Image (cartoon, helix red, strand yellow):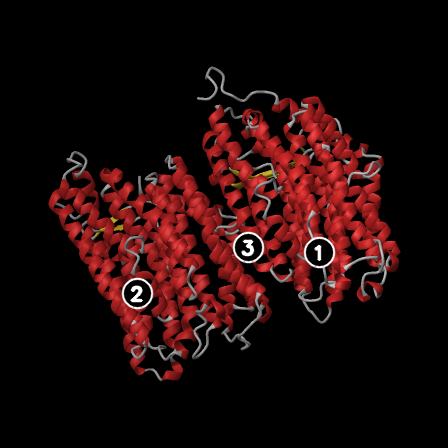
Amino acid sequence: MENIRYDLITALPEIIIVSMAMFILLADLFLKPANRIAIYLLAQVTLLIAAYITFTTHVPSVSYAFTNSFVDDAMSDVLKLMIYLGTSLIFVYSRQYIQQRDMYRGEFYALTLFSVVGMMIMVSGQSMLTLYIGLELLSLSLYALVALDRDNAKATEAAMKYFVLGALASGMLLYGMSMIYGMTGSLNIAEISGALIGADKLHSVLILGLVFIVSGLAFKLGAVPFQMWVPDVYEGSPTAMTMLISSVPKLAAFAFVIRLLVQALPSLAIDWQQMLMFMAVLSIIIGNITAIAQTNLKRMLAYSTISHIGFMMYGLMSASTNGFVYAMFYIVSYVLMTLAGFGMIMLLSRKGFEADKLDDLKGLNQRSPWHAFLMLIVMFSMAGVPPTLGFYAKFSVLQAALQAGYLWLVVFAVLMAVIGAFYYLRVIKMMYFDDPVDHHPIEAPVDMRIVLGVNSLALLVIGLMPEKLMELCIYAITRSLS
Amino acid sequence: MLNYFSSDYFFSHILSYSIWVPVLAGIAVLFTSNDNKPDTTRWVALIGGLAAFLVTIPLYTHFNFADGGFQFQEGFNWIPAFHINYHLGADGIAIPLIMLTSFTTVIVIISAWQVIEKRVAQYMASFLIMSGLMIGVFSALDAILYYVFWEAMLIPMFLVIGIWGGPNRVYATIKFFLYTLLGSLLMLVAFIYLYMNTNSFEIVDFYNYQMPLNVQILIFLAFFAAFAVKIPMWPVHTWLPDAHVEAPTGGSVVLAAIALKLGGYSFLRFAMPIAPDAAHYLSGFMITLSLIAIVYIALVALVQKDMKKLIAYSSISHMGFVTLGFFIFNNLGLEGAIVQMVSHGFISAAMFLCVGVLYDRVHSREIKSYGGVANTMPTFAAFAVLFAMANSGLPGTSGFVGEFMVILGAIQENFWYAFLASFTLIFGAAYTLWMVKRVFYGEIANAKVAALKDLCQREFLILAILAVMVLALGIYPQPLTDMTNATVTQLLSHLMQSKLPVGLPSGL
């Protein structure tokens, strides 16, 4: 009895969000369309309560629940708080957007909350099965969200692509997991790593299992050569969904990689380091070079995501505690930048106008200098130019890679960063140097303007004072990986 | 409790004030943004710029001339996770350049007074913020702090060229940005490498770190990539003529007067003291590039049809003197190079302002659009001829002092270096005076020139100030050389000590 209570308390935030998601679905049926704001507020309050519980029940030590298949450690708590924050921002940014496109319904909020639960389970999974369930809960919610706008042919196509390729990736992941299970006889992360200590590291089933797992993870992260779905899905989905797909789930995917590769398979580090290395280099090349040719802003950001994932992998492939800390720092910075970037696209969009072409940004400085300035910060941050947050993100992962002895890979990444800077600069060029084509006044609710301002300025402020965020990442990783 | 306004606090944080006063003034200017009332913006900018200049004056008055080390030091732990400190300090090389920066910013603000009419606040703010960031570059004693200032300074310059520039501005500004970024990222890799070995980003710790020659060469080349682009040295100079031609007058002035000095200064601050053996090893290479810049680029300048392009090439040629002075490793050469940097700051600023004066009236930078300007603008012609003489290194002007010292230094090293370098006195005179002849003398070329009005008070004021500076530095350069003397001696003695690890054969 005592055990069950303990288990339930450990997973309290997840339980609350699931219950609230179902309550939102029901409540939506009884609400008049004019009162939908209640649903929105309910969703925000849910996240707030979950954040409160996660924050107050946090202890620096590691505790397990549900017969060791669920873990509550510093990394999971920090990442969960980031996920709440990111999702809350998504709700703020997307409210007007989905209102104008007739998706302002309980389903959007319920599905998003389900995906949040999926991410939380991924973050806290201590058994391959838990991890997999979390991933599927996240993925299925996202497939449904992309297809939420039923009559939108492009979105439906994107959802189909996302679903088919995502299911394939899940299959690969599961297959890999089954091989590891076959070799070690356990699904539990700690037991797997224990069983592998004395094992034959060159056993082909083990290596094959690892290959499948890494491929599955790369699919979910969107790393080359498993990136094909990323641009199409980003472009086809409604911007609110693109924003969701491209941001917070990457935090969960990062935790997933840490749990599976770092915690379960540290004995195979030499093998997965090499795989990550190839994927990192390819992602940076393909991401940065292909982004240059894009005329669609969402598509460009998709390729930019691919290259960011490549940079993040520079931290992971160093296979040192520092490397993981910096990878986490990178992914958190990436999420903040992406949210601000897509937030700006949604701010500029209106009914019947998506603002997702590069040309739509033309002359923004003349229409609204303030918003042009915010987007300027976002773009320079993505390009990694100081004094923005993006600089420290790149700086730290490159440092980790250099420490691990990858001098020439670092030089290469640096050259690619210059190519990357070109397409971010082009966005700035459109905003500042060109004359506007679109003269509509920018209409957006006040809360969205304020939050977007804070979000973008945070990139500059944290860039000037990155210490706190870095300390948080150091705390999360060192406490969890001891 | 700390009293932020007490004079003690001020003098112990004077470099911070020099950096942040212009930056805050720039932000304040942004808040006055209103294109219907640009005069408010202009006055706020001018007051901010003057305040920023006044703040830097105690750097000279409170300077200890006998001390060659870093003075006015201050700092705190900025990002302990990476051992990055906010550590400022300035020596006799940095302070003249800091003062040059704040001085030039005031000139730029006045020169833009009636010229810039669209988005005045953003223009003024860009220059004020850029001025603070460049002073940051000159005074940072922590490599990453330095890097942050160095890169951040690109952002306002990128916008200045792109928004207020000429017809081909987008190409020019993106080229400028990417060229510089590429070089600086390689420098960043070098910083991280040094950090891994010293566990510190303090420049002084880098100075004391010993490295084998092949590592030093790689480090030196990484720095070279960053600084050679910035100076710019032949053959990575091609961004400069494009950027200058397209930039608005103020942008050209800051680029030529200060941005190029960032590269020269950084050679002295980083590349040479951190990798002195590599600097000696590669000095032949560096001197060759410098001489090519001096001679070949001067010839290129000779055939230019665009006045701004001509001055841009002349800048590259003059900066060749600076790098030549660095890499002959003697007192005279080094000090001459520093004088040359400061003097070129005044002269090139003045030359670009002169072109700006003509461009504002005729809207052409082509030499052939002019002729006989001296007949309609006598006062202006007098100034322009003075600056042209200074640019060609006439004795009595500041242009002469630096070049002469470098040539004297070069003779001590190798006669032929000096021989080739002194060609600049001929070519420099040739391209500058030929331009003056075609633009200012002769018959009045066309109706536009005939309708020209002479300098207004504002233009007269800035040109007069610059003329005084050029002459003062030419006749009595001692205040400047006094300031640099101790630092140069100390730097040279550091450069003469090998930093190769003891007990290891070199080349390993």
Report if residue A379 is visible in the image. Answer: yes
Q: Are marks 1 and 3 in contact (CB under 8 Å)?
A: no
Report if residue B204 is visible in the image. Answer: no
Q: Nearer the viewer, residue A185 or A165?
A: A165
Query: Which amino acid lies under the numbered mark 2 shown in the image of this protein?
Result: Ile
Q: Secondary structure at mark 2?
A: helix
**Residue at 78%, 34% in the rendered image:** B401
Q: Nearer the viewer, residue B390 or B376?
A: B376
Residue that numbered label 2 is attached to: A17
Displayed quadrant of residue B335: top right
Q: Is residue B191 above or below residue B117?
A: above
Disc 1: which chain? B
Residue neighbourhood size for the residue with mark 1, other residues' Cα within 10 Å, grouped as few (<14), some (14–19), many (≥20): many
Query: Which amino acid lies under the numbered mark 1 shown in the image of this protein?
Result: Thr
Asked whether the residues under marks 1 and 3 belong to the same chain, the reply is yes
**Residue at 61%, 24% in the rendered image:** B495
Q: Nearer the viewer, mark 2 or mark 1?
A: 1
Disc 3: which chain? B
Q: Is residue A37 above or below residue A277?
A: below
Residue that numbered label 1 is attached to: B249
| Real-space Cα separation, disc 2 to disc 1, in angstroms | 60 Å
Query: Which amino acid lies under the numbered mark 3 shown in the image of this protein?
Result: Ile
